[in-house]
Image (cartoon, rainbow, N blue to C red):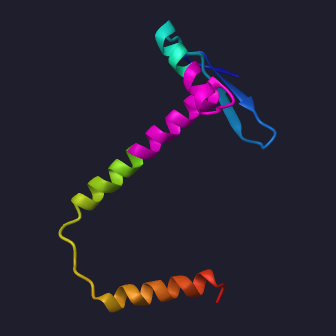
Amino acid sequence: MPLPGGTLWQSLPSGRCMATMNISLPDELKEFVDQQVLEHAYGSSSEYLRELIRMQRDAQSLRALLLDGAESGPAVAMEADFFDSMRARARQRAAGK
């Protein structure tokens, strides 16, 4: 199904949809992408670009979390017992209790 901007949608066996997007790159960037695919064992240039996009999305999410934290006000000091209790509960959950 074509969308504006030349994007196509493809249905995958998993039931998820994947869009197809054509991009133009100068030769220098195309060679760089090809080199990254070979050096880092990506299956294709599409796989490499998907990973870059995911990394950018994750970086933006992290930046938003950091900004939220910076705007949340001063930190409150906690006693060591609080963290000991948190660790004990985490161990219990990990052990399935």
**Residue at horizontal 39 percent and vertical 44 percent from the top:** 60
**Left or right: 17 in relation to 34:** right
| Above or below, 19 relative to 80 | above
Is 88 in front, or is 31? 31
Residue 69 occupies quadrant: bottom left
Q: Residue furthest right?
A: 13
Is 47 in front, or is 28? 28
Residues in magenta?
Answer: 34-59
**Residue at horizontal 56 percent and vertical 36 percent from the top:** 51
**Residue at horizontal 48 percent and vertical 41 percent from the top:** 55
38 in magenta: yes
**Left or right: 42 in relation to 11:** left
| Above or below, 61 relative to 56 | below
44 in magenta: yes
Residue 77 occupies quadrant: bottom left
Q: Residue furthest left?
A: 74
Q: Residue furthest top?
A: 27
Quadrant (top left/top right/bottom left/bottom right) for the C terminus: bottom right
Quadrant (top left/top right/bottom left/bottom right) for the N terminus: top right
| Above or below, 30 relative to 60 | above
Whole-percent x, y for residue 12 in the image: 77, 36
